[in-house]
Amino acid sequence: MSAFDLALANLLSPMVLFFALGLSAALARSDLTIPESIAKFLALYLMMAIGFKGGAAVAKSGVDLRLVGVLLAGMAISALIPLIGFALLRLTTRLSVVDAAAVAAHYGSISIVTFVAATQALTSLGITYEGYLIAVAAVMETPAILTALLLVRRARPDSGHHEGREGLGALLREIGLNGSVVMLTGSFLIGMITGERGLKAVSPFVNDLFFGMICLFLLDMGLVAGRGMREGLKSLSWSAIAFGLYMPLISALIAFMLCFALGLSLGGTALMITLAASASYIAVPAAMRLALPEAKPSIYLTLSLGVTFPFNLTLGIPLYVWLAGRVV
Amino acid sequence: MSAFDLALANLLSPMVLFFALGLSAALARSDLTIPESIAKFLALYLMMAIGFKGGAAVAKSGVDLRLVGVLLAGMAISALIPLIGFALLRLTTRLSVVDAAAVAAHYGSISIVTFVAATQALTSLGITYEGYLIAVAAVMETPAILTALLLVRRARPDSGHHEGREGLGALLREIGLNGSVVMLTGSFLIGMITGERGLKAVSPFVNDLFFGMICLFLLDMGLVAGRGMREGLKSLSWSAIAFGLYMPLISALIAFMLCFALGLSLGGTALMITLAASASYIAVPAAMRLALPEAKPSIYLTLSLGVTFPFNLTLGIPLYVWLAGRVV
Amino acid sequence: MSAFDLALANLLSPMVLFFALGLSAALARSDLTIPESIAKFLALYLMMAIGFKGGAAVAKSGVDLRLVGVLLAGMAISALIPLIGFALLRLTTRLSVVDAAAVAAHYGSISIVTFVAATQALTSLGITYEGYLIAVAAVMETPAILTALLLVRRARPDSGHHEGREGLGALLREIGLNGSVVMLTGSFLIGMITGERGLKAVSPFVNDLFFGMICLFLLDMGLVAGRGMREGLKSLSWSAIAFGLYMPLISALIAFMLCFALGLSLGGTALMITLAASASYIAVPAAMRLALPEAKPSIYLTLSLGVTFPFNLTLGIPLYVWLAGRVV
Amino acid sequence: MQTYLKKRIAIVIEQPALNRVLDALDRLAVTGYTVYPVIAGRGREGSWRADAMVSDAGRMVSVVCVCDPAKVDSVVEPIYKIVARQVGIITISDCEVIRPDHF
Amino acid sequence: MQTYLKKRIAIVIEQPALNRVLDALDRLAVTGYTVYPVIAGRGREGSWRADAMVSDAGRMVSVVCVCDPAKVDSVVEPIYKIVARQVGIITISDCEVIRPDHF
Amino acid sequence: MQTYLKKRIAIVIEQPALNRVLDALDRLAVTGYTVYPVIAGRGREGSWRADAMVSDAGRMVSVVCVCDPAKVDSVVEPIYKIVARQVGIITISDCEVIRPDHF
Ligand SMILES: Nc1ncnc2c1ncn2[C@@H]1O[C@H](COP(=O)(O)O)[C@@H](O)[C@H]1O
Ligand SMILES: Nc1ncnc2c1ncn2[C@@H]1O[C@H](COP(=O)(O)O)[C@@H](O)[C@H]1O
Ligand SMILES: Nc1ncnc2c1ncn2[C@@H]1O[C@H](COP(=O)(O)O)[C@@H](O)[C@H]1O
Ligand code: NA
Ligand code: NA
Ligand code: NA
C-alpha cells in the first residue's frame, strides 16, 4: 500500500471520523459533551483493555532479551527527545525556560490513544505487533518529565526551593503513581499472570467492545481538541504551532533510526515510531502542574491536544506505518 | 398477529418491564437512581448506535428518491402537528398561549427512545424497515420548535423583544446544534461513509449491547416518568392529561394517511407512525427554556414524559404496528 | 481439587488480581480512582445482570417447594447471625451496644460482590448452581437490620424516641426500598417473566460483559478497601479485627450445618455458605446511618470492607467451596 | 440597585439523612433550597472521599436555604435537631437579594 | 494578614440559560467566575433532582463571581435581566480577599 | 438561638494541587473541611470546562474550611503560599455556627 492509500484508509476510518465529529461540534459551539466521569471511565477502560491484552500476548510469546532492549530504548527516547524539543523551542519561539521545558516534556512522553489508534490501523491492515510494546508505552510515560525538571534546574539553579516542603522525592512519587500509569502497568501484569485463560474470560469486554469504546473516546478527544483550538490557538505564536507539527516528525525520525537496531517486526516498528512521535496530554500536564506550576497550561495543552494529536491521528499514523516499512 | 397479541407481547418484553420497574420504584419512593452522567452516557450511546446502524443500512441499500420524499414528509409532519395540537389545547384546556405552544412543540418533535422501542418490537416480530428512517427521525426533531415560536409571535406580536440581544439567529443556532441532534446526525453520516466495513468493527458495541443498554435506559425513563407523575400530575388538569393520550393517536392517524403515499415497507410505515405519535423530552424542553422561558416546564415535561411516553411504550407501539399493517 | 489448589486458582484469577491492584494502588496512595457515578453504574449493572440471569434460570427450572425452604432458611440465617455476632462482640471487644449491634447487622446481611465472585469461581470449576440462590441473596439483605434494631431496643428501652417523627414504619420502608434490593429483586422478576427469550436478547450485555465488569468493580472495591485500611484500621482494636476474620467462619459453619437439611446442589451449597459468611457494605451501612446514627461508620465499614471482604474474596471462597464438598 | 437582607443557612449533612432534612424544610415555611454535591471532606468522623466509597453511608451533601432573618430560628432549630444526631454541620451567614418576596 | 472587601455574587440558574449568563459575564468587567454543579433543589417551579431527569431543562447550576463592591451594580443588573426571565435566583454577600487587584 | 461568629475560608484551587492544600489543612489546627466539585470557570488563565478535559490539569475544585476568627491568619498564610504559586483564589467571609467548639 502506498503512503497515500494508507492515509486515505486512515482518514475514512470510524475512529478518525468520530474525532472529526467531535472537533466540528466543538468548533461550531454545539452543546454536545461527554460527561467528565464517562470520559474518565473510557480512559480507564482503554488502559485496562490494552494493558491486559499486551500482558496476555507476552505471556503467550514469552519474555526474551529483545524485550529488555526495547524497554531501554523506549526510556532513552523519552528522556532524550525533550532535550531536542527544548533546544528547538528556545531557538525558534519566545517561550520562557519553564514553558519550553514543560512543552518539551509532553513530546518526550506518549499518548496512549495515539498508540491505540495505530494498533487499530495495523489490525485493519492485517499487520501484527509485539505485545510488549504496551509495556514500552508504560515506561515511556515518565522519563521525559525528569528531563524537563533537570532542564529547568540547570537554567535556574535556585528554583529548587519551589518544591518546598514536598521535596523532589514526594514529587517523583506523585508522578510515578499517576493513575493512568498504575492502571496500564497493573493490567499488563494481570494479563501476563493470567495469560490465555484470563484473556478468554475478559475477551468480550476488552476485545469485542474495544473499537466502539475507542470511537466514543475519540469523539471526546475531538470535543476537547476543538475547544482547545477555539480557546487556545489564538494565544500561541506561529512558531509554537509549527513546533507542534514538525516535532513529532523529528521524534519519529529518531525512533526510525533506532529501530534499525531493535529488530522489531513491521507492526512493532510502526508502534515504536508512533510512541516517539506522540505527545502526552494526561500524565504529563498533571505532573507539570505540580512540578512546574509557573508553566502555562494553555500553551502545552493546546499544542499537545489541539495541534499534535490531530496531526498524528490523521496524517502521522499512516506516515509512521509507511516509515516502518522502510525499516523492516 | 392480532393487535391484542401484539400488545401483550410488547407489554411482557424486558424493555417495557424495566420501564415498569423504574416507574414502580419511583412511585414507591425507592432511592433507586441512575446517576446523571450514566443517563447521559446511555442517551449518547443510543444516538450513536441507532445513527450508525441507520447510516450503514443506507450505505448498503443506496440513496433513492423515496428517501427525499420521506424526509420532506417527516419535516412537514413535525411542522404541522403543533398547529393541530395548539388549537386543541387552546380549545379544551386553560393553558396560556405560551404554554399551549410549548406543549404542542413537544408533540410535533419526536422521542428517540420510543422510536428505538418500536424498532425492537419490529425486530422481535421479524419485520424489517428502511435504514434511513433514522435520518427522518433526525430531521423531525426541530421543525416543530419553529412552528411553536411562530404561533407565539402571531398571538403576541410584541414578544420579539424577548429574544433580546441573542436574537432569533442565535436561538436557531443553539437549537440546531443541540447535542442529541448532532450526535444522531453525525453517527448516521459516519455509518454511511464507513458502511459495512465500519459496522463490522463497531458491531459488538452498537448491536450486541444494544438491547441491554436500552433496558437500562428504560429503567431510567421509568424512574424519571414516575417522579414526574408523583410531582407533576397533580398540577395538570384532566383535559391536559387527556391531550397527552389522544394527541399521539391524532398524530398517528395523520402519519397513517400520509404513509399511503410514501410507499414505505411495513416496518418503515410503523416507524413513521411511531415518530409522528411520539413526543420529545430532550431536545424540545431544552429549546423551550431558551426560546419560551415563560412556558412552564412542569406542564410540558409531565405531559410528554409522564403521560405520552408510557402510553406509547406500552399500548401505542403495538397499535402503530397494527395500523401499519392496514397501509401496506 | 484440594482446598489448596482451589485457593491458588482463586488467588490467581483476574478478579482477585484486579482487587489486589486496587488495594495496592490505594495503599501506595496512587491517585487512581473510579469516578463515583461509574462505581454506581457497575453496581447497578451487577444487580441487573445477576438478578436477570437468576430469574431466567428459575423460569427454566420451575419453582419447587425447595425454593421456599431455602428462602426461609436464608432469612433465618440473616436474622440469627447478628445475635451471635453481637454476643461475641460484647464479650471480646469494648464496642458499645450500638456499635456492636451495627457491626453484627452487617454480618447477618450479605455482600453481592462476594456472591458473584463465588459464582465465577464455581463456573471456572465447571460447577453449576440453582438460579434461585440470587433470590435468597435478595431476601437475606434486610432481616439482619431488624435484629440489630431489636438488640438496641432491648438494651436501651428508651431509644425508641430516636426514630422521632419518622417512626419505625417509615424506617422500615426506607430500608426495604433500598435501591440495590429493588434492582436485584426487580431484575430477578423480569428474568423470571421473560425467561429464555428475554435472556437471549440481553445475553451479550448480562453474560458476555459480566466478567470484565466484575474485574472493574473489584478494582474499585480494592481501592475502597485499601483506603479503608489506611484510614480505618488504626482506629480498630485487635479483637475487633479478629472478629472480622473469625465471624465469617462461624457464619459459614452455621450455613454448612443447615445445608445438610436443604438438599441443595454442590454449587448451591457453596453459594449458601458464601452468603452467610459475607458481610454487607452497601445496604446495611446506609440503613445504619438512618436507624442507628450513633454507631460509628468508621468501625463497621472498615471491618466489613477492609477486613472481611478481602478475606472472603481471597481465602474464604475456596474454603466455602471445599466445605460444600463435605455436604453434598 | 436596591437589595434586601436575608440569611443563608448552609448545611453539610451525610447523604442517607438528606431526605429527612429536605422533608423538614418542606414542612417549614421556606420558599426553596439548593442541594450541592460534596466530593470529599474531613470532620470529627475522619476524612472521606466520594470516589472511594461503595455505599452512600459516609458521603456528604450540602443544602443551602436562603430565608428571611425573622424566620431563621424557626428553620434552624428543627434542622439542627436532625443534624445534631447525624454527621454534619450548620453555618449561617448574611446575604442580600433583589426580590425580597422570593425568600 | 491584610485583606480587602469584595462582593460575592451567587447565581442559581437553570442549565439551558447558563451560557447566556456566562456570555454576559464575559462582556462585563469581571475578572472571573466559578460554576458549581447543583444536584437538587426546590423553588417556585417545584422540586427537582438531577438524577431524575433526561433533559437539561429544569436542571440548575450555580455561578459565583467575586468582584469589587464598586462594580456590583453594573454586574448584577444585566445578569438580573436574564435571571428574572428564567428559573433562578441571585444573592450577594460580603467577602474578603488577599490580592485586591485579582478581582 | 444563640450563635457564634466564625470565619469561612473558601479556596478555589486546581485539582492537581488539591492534595497539597488538604495536607496543609491537616497539619494546621482546623477541625475539618469540605471539598466541592467545580464544573467550569474563568480566571486569568482563561476559561475551562470539566466536560471538555481529558487531564486533571486545569480542572478546579473548591475547599471550604470554617474556623475560629482567631485562627484565620495562621490558616490562611500557609494556604496562600500554596495557592499563590498555582491557579486559584482564596476568599474569606463571616458566618455563624451553633456549636462553637466544633470549629
Ligand atoms: N471546620 C469545618 N469546615 C468545613 N467543613 C467541615 C468542618 N467540619 C466538618 N465539616 C464538614 O462536615 C462533615 C461532617 O463533619 P463531622 O460531623 O465533624 O464529622 C465533614 O465531612 C465535612 O465535610
Ligand atoms: N429560598 C431558596 N434558598 C435556596 N435556593 C433557592 C431558594 N429558592 C429557590 N432556590 C433555588 O433556585 C432554583 C430556582 O428557583 P425558582 O426560580 O424559585 O423556581 C431552585 O430550584 C433552587 O435550586
Ligand atoms: N472573580 C472571580 N470570581 C469567582 N471565581 C473566580 C474569580 N477569578 C477566578 N476565579 C476562579 O478561580 C480559578 C482560577 O483563577 P485564576 O488563578 O485567576 O486563573 C478560575 O478558574 C475560577 O474558577
Ligand atoms: Na513522544
Ligand atoms: Na411527534
Ligand atoms: Na452474612
Image: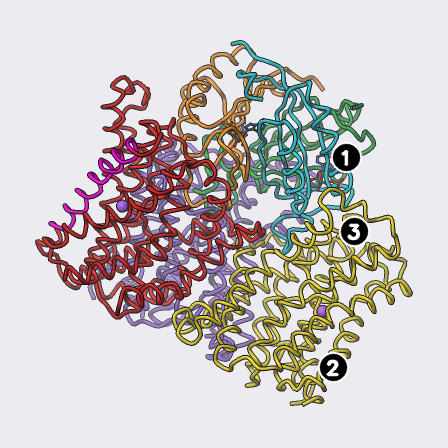
Chain colours: A purple, B red, C yellow, D cyan, E orange, F green
The mark that comes first in sequence, 3 or 2, is: 2
Q: Which residue does the numbered mark 1 point to in the structure image?
A: F30
Q: Which residue does the numbered mark 3 point to in the structure image?
A: C296
Q: Do labels 3 and 1 share a chain?
A: no
Q: Which residue does the numbered mark 2 point to in the structure image?
A: C258
What type is the residue that disc 3 sits on? Answer: Lys
Residue at the image position 31 percent from the left and 38 percent from the top: A27
Q: Mark 1 lies on which chain?
A: F
Q: In this view, does E4 lie to the left or right of A190?
A: right
Q: For the residue carrying disc 1, how many other residues have a C-alpha within 10 Å: few (<14), some (14-19), or many (20+)?
A: some
Q: Which image quarter holds the N terminus of chain E?
A: top right
Residue C266 in percent (x, y) is at: 63, 86
Q: Which chain carries label 2?
A: C
Residue at the image position 17 percent from the left and 42 percent from the top: B76
Cα separation, mark 3 vs mark 2, equals 33 Å
Q: Residue C222 or C191: which is nearer the viewer?
A: C191
What type is the residue that disc 2 sits on? Answer: Leu
What type is the residue that disc 1 sits on? Answer: Val
Q: What element does badge 1 sit on?
A: loop
Q: Are marks 3 and 2 on the same chain?
A: yes
For discs 3 and 1, the disc positioned in front in the rendered view: 3
Q: Residue A51 or E64: which is nearer the viewer?
A: E64
Whether residue C122 is situated above or below residue A118 in the rendered picture? below
Residue E58 lies in the magenta stretch: no
Tell me: is circle 3 under 8 Å from ligand 1.
no
Cα separation, mark 1 vs mark 2, equals 53 Å
Total labels: the figure holds: 3
- Segment colored magenta: B69-91
Q: What secondary structure is the stretch in magenta mostly built from?
A: helix
Kindly indicate whether the residue at mark 2 contacts the one at mark 3 (C-beta within 8 angstroms): no
